């Protein structure tokens, strides 16, 4: 019997009854909050005598607000901004630790993949190393597309030298320069030449282009031309190789001078890789060959040992690794792997005949015309599975172009560009603005909720009970109000940086700090409103009926001042956004690489960025300004609607 009573809850409640009471309590609380909002904005139902619907002060507030077109437009924009920054990240994943040195400071551009119309039906060659690409048509015309203007030097790669008008045999693109060989035998460079990329200009720590090349060359003797990071290589049919450019960026450039019997030269981000005519490869250094993966399986041997009895017929270079193709059709990749470069494609019995390398991906073509691509595929540059009949595949920096035997473009895939450019670490500004907006609005929203909860509790209790309770709470409020807000927030943020806590916890603490320091104004306002409401007859009637004081305060008095609270919360939200951005801008808020609009501006506080890379500071400040202005417009409209006598529209 006793057990039965215990099961029914007589002696000790079971786990199920505890969860049930928690569920019922939560539902009751939510209904109560919804009831406050409903009563505040829609009033009460008909009075039971067939009379008209009673209008609450907040109902009038709602009508007055929606009469203001500017405020409604601001509300629509803000709602759309909230939906955008909270939904878009689901479809725009971001790796906060991602960097790409070859995509630094790229201006807003969306044509990095778009071949010029005159090149699509007659492609002789395509070459790209960074954010612009150079192509040569079968008629010998040079085309340049992508982000072609250098923000620092103001040189536009589309401004072709006059020497190229007579016709071009081949051309190659580097980081900030391009080289072409004309049909008349001239070697013409354009773009930046401050590091000896072309010409006979004497530059410190650079190898100047050989004088014999400056005098001209027989176009039929040019076997290969390639460009890298401020460096260039030209290979003649007799095996003579010329390499010149910046020895600081291409760290083995000086070791490769005077090479003969050269078949091909390719540039990775910081080194040159040379294929010799005897089927061996060299770089002048061994630092590149750290890991080896082959189409026949993984090996623990070094690349030199693995290639001891093999002959290499084709090479390609990416950022930190190289791809090799042997005369037996074996595919080999060696170097520092990243972004799935070591996951080689399955090409079965097909024989690969050509290779090409982008920034972090490779592409190969088989004898049957099938295209295989692998490596970094964040922009779809490896999505070429259904391409048939390809004769050649060219890899740009983050693009791939499949071409048939007649030089016609079959398919182009990869990065189209950056809507708002990239920052100093090669990160997409638009993606970081979206994720940073989510963080900024979340921090501001949580801070407002925390400050409003404190203000509601303190203001309601102080205003309703009065006496020594009012005096004590108001003195505490004055103490918090007397603190210098921004310096104190900076101090607390700096203190928590020295504790070994996670970044998520640190961000949460910053939210609490902002909320705990910004509640005083709203608390005083609520106190004044409650002081007025407690003298009304419905409070006296509730007391006479024996209603508890806490219920009178929070169920009867507080709903009547909810409109004032919402107006103040709206204005405080804008203040919290600016405060969080100010803290992050000063380096005391959310830290990099986690983006917020504030710390994105923090990375732009130098004259070089402000003068040359305008997109890095313009777009974050624009989003922050529009969000803050919209919130202030909404708050001002709510305040004017609450007090029509002060409205400038009347």
Image: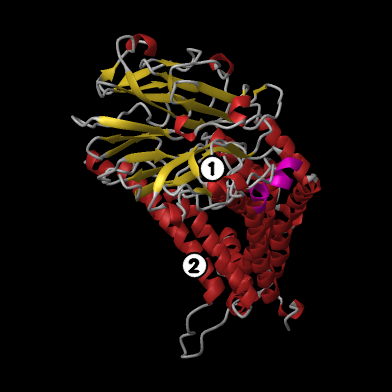
First along the sequence among labels 1 and 2: 2
- Of the 4 image quadrants, the one containing the N terminus is top left
Residue at the (62%, 77%) spot, across then down: 69
Q: Nearer the viewer, residue 3 or 590?
A: 590
Snapshot quadrant of residue 492: top right
Find residue 13 and report its horizontal and vertical position in percent: 33, 43
Graded by Cα atoms within 10 Å as few (under 14), some (14 to 19) or many (20 or more), the crowding at tag 1 reads many
Snapshot quadrant of residue 648: bottom right
Q: Nearer the viewer, residue 563 or 169?
A: 169
Left or right placement of residue 489 versus residue 55 in this view: right
Find residue 521 and report its horizontal and vertical position in percent: 73, 57
Magenta stretch, residue numbers: 605-618
Asked if 505 appears above or below 26 in the picture, the reply is above
Asked if 309 appears above or below 503 in the picture, the reply is above
Q: Mark on residue 35? A: 2
Task: Indicate yes or no whether the magenta region holds residue 610.
Answer: yes
């Amino acid at each position: 019997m006793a057990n039965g009573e215990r099961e029914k809850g007589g002696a000790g409640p079971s786990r199920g009854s505890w969860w049930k009471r928690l569920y019922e309590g939560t539902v009751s609380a939510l209904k109560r909050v919804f009831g406050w909002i409903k009563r505040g904005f829609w009033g009460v139902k008909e009075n039971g005598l067939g009379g008209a619907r009673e209008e609450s002060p907040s109902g009038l507030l709602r009508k007055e607000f929606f009469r203001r077109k500017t405020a409604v437009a601001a509300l629509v924009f803000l709602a759309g901004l909230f939906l955008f920054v909270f939904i878009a990240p689901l479809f725009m994943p971001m790796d906060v630790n991602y960097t790409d040195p070859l995509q630094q400071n790229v201006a807003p551009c969306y044509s990095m993949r778009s071949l010029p119309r005159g090149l699509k039906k007659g492609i002789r060659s395509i070459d790209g190393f960074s954010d612009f690409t150079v192509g040569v048509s079968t008629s010998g015309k040079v085309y340049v597309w992508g982000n072609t203007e250098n923000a620092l030097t103001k040189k536009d790669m589309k401004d072709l030298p006059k020497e190229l008008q007579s016709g071009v045999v081949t051309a190659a693109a580097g980081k900030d320069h391009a080289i072409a060989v004309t049909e008349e035998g001239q070697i013409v460079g354009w773009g930046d030449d401050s590091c000896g990329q072309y010409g006979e200009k004497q530059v410190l720590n650079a190898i100047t282009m050989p004088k014999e090349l400056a005098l001209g060359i027989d176009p039929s003797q040019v076997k290969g031309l390639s460009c890298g990071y401020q460096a260039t290589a030209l290979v003649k049919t007799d095996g003579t190789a010329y390499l010149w450019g910046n020895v600081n960026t291409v760290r083995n450039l000086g070791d490769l001078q005077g090479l003969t019997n050269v078949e091909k030269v390719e540039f990775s981000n910081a080194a040159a890789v040379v294929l010799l005519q005897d089927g061996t490869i060299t770089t002048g250094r061994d630092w590149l060959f750290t890991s080896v993966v082959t189409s026949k399986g993984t090996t623990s041997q070094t690349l030199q040992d693995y290639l001891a009895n093999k002959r290499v017929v084709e090479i390609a270079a990416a950022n930190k690794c190289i791809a090799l193709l042997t005369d037996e059709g074996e595919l080999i990749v060696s170097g520092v792997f990243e972004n799935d470069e070591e996951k080689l494609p399955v090409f079965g019995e097909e024989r690969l005949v050509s290779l090409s390398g982008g920034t972090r991906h490779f592409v190969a073509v088989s004898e049957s015309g099938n295209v295989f691509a692998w490596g970094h595929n964040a922009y779809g540059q490896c999505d070429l599975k259904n391409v048939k009949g390809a004769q050649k595949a060219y890899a740009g920096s983050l693009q791939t172009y499949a071409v048939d035997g007649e030089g016609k473009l079959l398919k182009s895939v990869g990065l189209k560009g950056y809507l708002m450019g990239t920052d100093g670490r090669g990160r997409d500004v638009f993606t970081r603005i979206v994720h940073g907006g989510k963080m900024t609005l979340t921090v501001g929203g949580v801070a407002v909720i925390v400050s409003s909860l404190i203000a509601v509790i303190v203001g309601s209790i102080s205003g309703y009970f009065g006496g020594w309770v009012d005096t004590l709470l108001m003195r505490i409020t004055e103490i918090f109000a007397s603190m210098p807000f921004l310096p104190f927030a900076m101090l607390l943020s700096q203190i928590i940086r020295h504790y070994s806590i996670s970044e998520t916890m640190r961000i949460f603490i910053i939210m609490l700090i902002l909320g705990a320091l910004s509640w005083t104004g709203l608390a005083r306002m609520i106190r004044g409103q409650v002081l007025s409401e407690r003298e009304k007859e419905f409070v006296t009637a509730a007391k006479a009926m024996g209603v508890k004081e806490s219920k009178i305060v929070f169920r009867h008095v507080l709903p009547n001042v909810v409109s004032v609270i919402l107006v103040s919360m709206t204005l405080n939200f804008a203040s919290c956004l600016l405060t969080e951005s100010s803290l992050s801008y000063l380096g005391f808020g959310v830290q990099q690489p986690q983006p917020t609009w504030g710390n994105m501006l923090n990375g732009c506080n130098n004259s070089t960025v402000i003068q040359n890379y305008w997109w890095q500071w313009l777009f974050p400040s624009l989003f922050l300004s529009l969000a803050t202005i919209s919130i202030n417009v909404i708050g001002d409209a709510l305040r004017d609607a609450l007090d029509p006598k002060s409205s400038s529209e009347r």
